Image (tube, grey):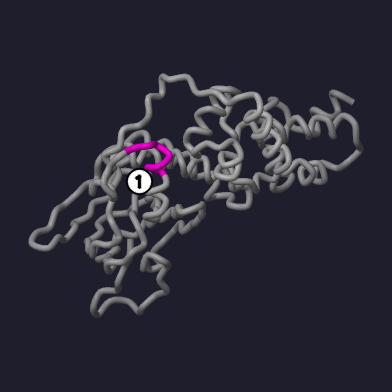
Amino acid sequence: MSATPQANGPAIQSLDSFGCMSGLLGKNQELSGSGIRFFRKRSDSTALGQVQTPASDRGFLAGVSLSAGHRRRIFHAHHASEHDFEMSSVYLRDFSDDYRADLNGPFDFLLIEISYAFIDRTRDDMRGACSRGLERVVARVDNVLGHLAMALLPALDRPTEAEALFVDQLGLAIGTHLVGSYGGSTLPNTRKSRRLSELQESRAKELIRNHLDGSISVSDIADTCNMSRSYFIRAFCETTGQTPYQWLLSQRVDSARKLLTNSTLSLADIAFACGFADQSHFTRVFTQTLGTPPGRWRRSHS
C-alpha cells in the first residue's frame, strides 16, 4: 500500500516503505524473515484518499484483512473495479505492476512482501512445476491464510520474542500456502509417510538445543539433514509430534525446570540462560506449558 496526499489537502506527512502516510496509521509494525517481510497496517481514519505505488522489482504483495468493512476502488488500464473486504479477505498483486486505488473506510491488514527468490525456492521445496508468478486476486476469502496471519500477530506485537526459527517456520507455511493455492503448483502427497532417520533426528535436535535462543533458521537445520525446508518441517512433525519451534519451546521449559529445581538463580537469570527474550516471555511460555508460573512451580518443587 502507498499513499499520496491529495491536491489542496493536508501538509505532506512522513511516508513508510509502502508510501503510506504514517500519521494515518494507528498501528504500524514490521517483522522480517528470510526473503519475506511482514507488516501490520491499521487505520481508523475515514479520510484515506488515494494510494498508489509505481512498478518495481520488489516481488509480490499479499494482503490479509484482519477486519471487515473496508472497501477500495482499484484503477486498471481501461476500467476500475470496486471490492469489499471481509475478515480474512486476501489480495495478491505483483509489484511489477503499477497500482492505484481509492481507499474507503478503516482497515486492518497484515501485508506480506515476498521476494521472487523466496517464491522460486518455495516451488523448489514443493517440487512443483509452474510458471513464475502468483495469481492476481482481490478480496477473496482465504481462511487458511487468515489463521496464519492471526498466528503472526503476537510476534509483531512483541518483536524481541520473535526468534528466527519461528519466523522462518511461519513464513514457510505462508509461502507454501500461497504457491500451492495461487501459483499453479500441487502440494506433494501429504499422506505419504515422512520421518527423519535416527541420525537426522539426532542432528536436528542437537542443533536446536545448541541454539535455545532461536537464532538458528529452518534452512540451516534442513541443510544439515540434506532436506528441503518444507520436507524437513513435515518430517520433523511426523517424527516428534511437534513443529521445530514447539520442540524448541519444550526444551527451554525443560531446561528452566532443572534450573528452578537445582539452582538459586533468579527468574530473570533463568530466562536468559534458557533462551527466552526476557522474564515476562519466560513466565508466559512456562505458564502456558505447565499451567503454573515458574515462581510458584519452584516453591512447590523445592
Q: Is residue 259 visible?
A: yes
| Residue 19 placement: quadrant | bottom left
Quadrant that contains the C terminus? top right
Quadrant that contains the N terminus? bottom left
The residue drawn where x is 70% and y is 25% is 290
The residue drawn where x is 56% and y is 39% is 222
Residue count near mark 1 (Cα–Cα under 10 Å), binned few <14, some 14–19, many ≥20: many
Q: Which residue ends up furthest to the left in the rendered image?
A: 78
In this orientation, which residue lies closer to the viewer: 269 or 56? 56
**Is 62 located above or below residue 3 in the figure?**
above
Position of residue 185 measured from the top left corner of the image (x, y, whole percent): 30, 37
The residue drawn where x is 64% and y is 28% is 201
Position of residue 249 measured from the top left corner of the image (x, y, whole percent): 66, 34
In this orientation, which residue lies closer to the viewer: 284 or 179? 179
In this orientation, which residue lies closer to the viewer: 129 or 259? 129
- Residue 285 on the magenta segment: no
Label 1 secondary element: strand
Position of residue 294 measured from the top left corner of the image (x, y, whole percent): 77, 33
The residue drawn where x is 38% and y is 44% is 66
Query: Predominant secondary structure in magenta?
Result: helix
Is residue 28 toward the left or the right of residue 95 in the image? right
Q: Which residues are magenta?
A: 122-128
The residue tagged 1 is 64
**Is 280 located above or below residue 73 in the figure?**
above
